[in-house]
Image: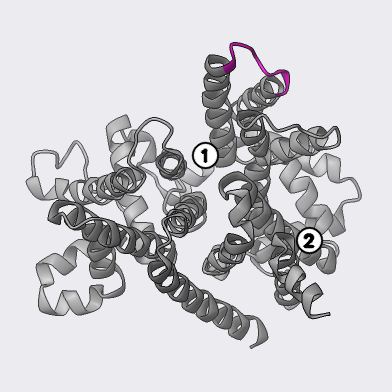
Amino acid sequence: MKEKIKRLVKDEKTIIILFIILELFLMVFVNTNVEDDSFFIELGKNNSNTFEIVKNRYNTWSSRVFIEFILIEVLKYKLLWAIIQSLMMGLLAYSISKLFVKDELKYKLNPIICVLILTYPINMLTLIGWGASTVNYIWPLATCLYALIPIKKYYNNEKIKWFEYPLYIVALLFACNMEQTSAILLGTYLLFSILLFIKNRKIKPFMLIQLILSVLSVIFILKCPGNALRLKAETAGHFKDFSTLSLIEKISLGFTSSVGDILKWTMNLSSIILCVSIVVYIFSEYKEKIYRTIAIIPLVFILALGIFSNFLQKIFPKIGSLSIAFQTPEVHLTTANINEIGSFMPLIFSIILFSFIALSILIIFKKIKGNIPLLIYIVGFCSRIIASFSSTVFMSAPRTILFFDFAMLIISLLIIQELIIKNKEKQVNILCTFIECIAGLQVLNLMIELFK
């Protein structure tokens, strides 16, 4: 019996199953009848034809026809939503493991994956309702990562089983029904289709199918009449001057609003975990002051202007005002103030923060070509920049930074994996203890909210 328990604990799938059970235990206590959830529940109650509902929504409000069809049907039965949500969290953990963890380290790193996911403050994501938020964001994230697994298999010359093909297609179609994940999948499949062709001198038919489906999904989103009507309505209601912004102003807004989301919301836990992981790794591997300075600046920046901003404002009010500027929902750099040096400060600090994190990733993984962690960082960051091209850039926070948050958590995982490979047991223990403490407090915080 003792040996069976040991084998069960070392089985990399066991921890994911236990993780799903924990998620189900938490989700059954969620109230799925508030905010947007109530709206979709009423839609389902008052209309017998869900197809007609989503067709009308496509023409008047949203291109997320697959997502909203499932949302309306699932929210009719709270327990069904709770079960699927728990399975999606398990799929998220499984997909991260399958994509990024070496086979021989899965039994060590799968528990860390689950703990990293638990550090994410999902209750902040669900301010508009648990059902609507999870189906629109968590489920596309999980299916997006799952739909990327064929790329890994083709690169490693692994065989794809016959029943996996339809699963990957369904996952991609669902994920591509959400704007940010459709862009992620299109860009990733396009890039790796080219790289695989260069490597093997032949086209993989299934890769081509997935790429074509991604392209068609993006066209479907761009051609949706409801999206245009919604943009017009939301611009009038939330950001009247949005249509007057230039391309440069929108890109600048993408940088500064991203930092604002990191500092304002408790989402900055993902960035703190990444920055701490960077500092631990670089300080253990390098003695050079230049490397250590590059590593520590992002952590100091986020802590000073985020968690400790109130203290900083009392001691250094001018520096503290920078934190207020980032967290104020406005365009900092415009054509009207472009001649004022002060108007550039939020953008400059934003570029420094993101650039130094990227440089730190380069230092850790020591290469530009084939640097998967750097690619993950760029893709995650770009997924947030895309949000600046929507008038809901401020209103939809913190949901639009979800994909960037998980990109940072995945990079943290890859840094831990590098430390394990280098036998840096002390550093691994420090990071894991730090992450476990955050995850424990996050779960406790969620339980207090759910059980109150």
Seen at 75% across and 32% down, the residue is 159
Image spot of residue 334 (x, y percent): 22, 40
Figure quadrant of residue 385:
top left
Q: Is residue 328 magenta?
A: no
How busy is the neighbourhood of tag 2: few (under 14 within 10 Å), some, or many (20 plus)? many
Seen at 50% across and 53% down, the residue is 410
Quadrant for the N terminus in the image: bottom right
In depth, the one of 359 and 426 nearer the eye is 426
Q: Is residue 203 magenta?
A: yes
**Residue under label 2:** 41
Q: Identify residue type, mark 2.
A: Ile
Image spot of residue 146 (x, y percent): 68, 44
Number of on-image labels: 2
In depth, the one of 57 and 265 nearer the eye is 265
Quadrant for the C terminus in the image: bottom right
Q: Secondary structure at mark 2?
A: helix
Figure quadrant of residue 90:
bottom right
Residue 102 lies, with reference to residue 21, above or below; the image says: above
Residue 344 lies, with reference to residue 87, above or below; the image says: above
> Range of the magenta residues?
200-206
How busy is the neighbourhood of tag 1: few (under 14 within 10 Å), some, or many (20 plus)? some
Contact? badges 1 and 2 (CB < 8 Å) = no
Whole-Å distance between the Cαs marked 1 and 2?
Answer: 24 Å
Seen at 73% across and 40% down, the residue is 171
The residue at the far right in this view is: 48
Say the numbered circle drawn on residue 231. 1
